[in-house]
Amino acid sequence: MTVGDTVKPRPATRVASFRGDRPVKLFLHVCCAPCLAKTLVGLRGVSARPPDLRLFFFNPNIHPLLEFRRRMTALRVYLEREELPAEIDGTYGLVPFLERLDGSFAGPERCGICLGWRMRETARRAKERGFDAFSTTLLASNEQDRDAVLLAAEAASAAEGIRFEGGDFRDAEVPEGGLKGIYRQSYCGCVFSEAERYGPTRKRLYG
Ligand code: SF4
């Protein structure tokens, strides 16, 4: 597997559109079903020529194992409705994730490594499979650091020599019932983000 890059923060400026003179063959990294649903609403809203999509679930940052399986299963269930082609990497990645962090367990540095890995692998596969461009559903999330996602994606684009398509679908509204029965996670993914999410709360396991 290609090694991802760590990227230094800088202001992200580019927000590409999906409009073009022909349908874009787009390899779309998927972080979770809810963000995919928003992205699909957004894509269908900005272009009369929806991209020719293939989805790619690659999230070795999601822990622990049962959470990883919940999110992957939610995507599979959602795809039974949408019937889009998808590559789903079902490898649980706790050890490789920690190895890749190499002790950088804090804040922006950790996220840069995490995002860099996922974007680089997405870009690599998109190029290998002959797609025009790649993108990610992370850009539909209101919880993600958008600049950090764009930065990682642009670095991956430059490293692999394939176009990155951005887009801002954070305000896209999924029609009522569109995510009925689909699991919705409550933290970003890694064990660190889980601790950051629940550490300040009084949530307890047993009453
Ligand atoms: S908080 Fe999210 S983006 Fe940052 S390292 Fe954890 S899983 Fe990755």
Image: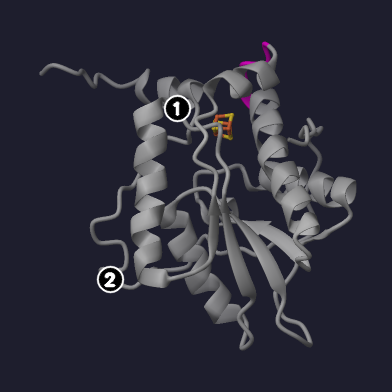
Residue 69 image offset from top left, x and y in percent: 38, 38
Q: Is mark 1 within 8 Å of ligand 1?
A: no
> Is residue 182 in the magenta section?
no
Front residue of 183 and 126: 126
Residue 2 image offset from top left, x and y in percent: 77, 36
* Disc marking residue 63: 1
* Disc marking residue 176: 2
* Disc marking residue 80: none
In what element is the residue under mark 2? loop
Q: Is residue 181 visible?
A: yes
Quadrant of the image where one finds ligand 1: top right
Q: CA distance from mark 1 to mark 2?
A: 29 Å
Q: Is residue 185 visible?
A: no
Q: Which quadrant would the N terminus be assigned to in this image? A: top right
Residue name at image x 55 percent, y 64 percent: 169
Residue 179 in which image quadrant:
bottom left
Highlighted range, magenta = 103-107
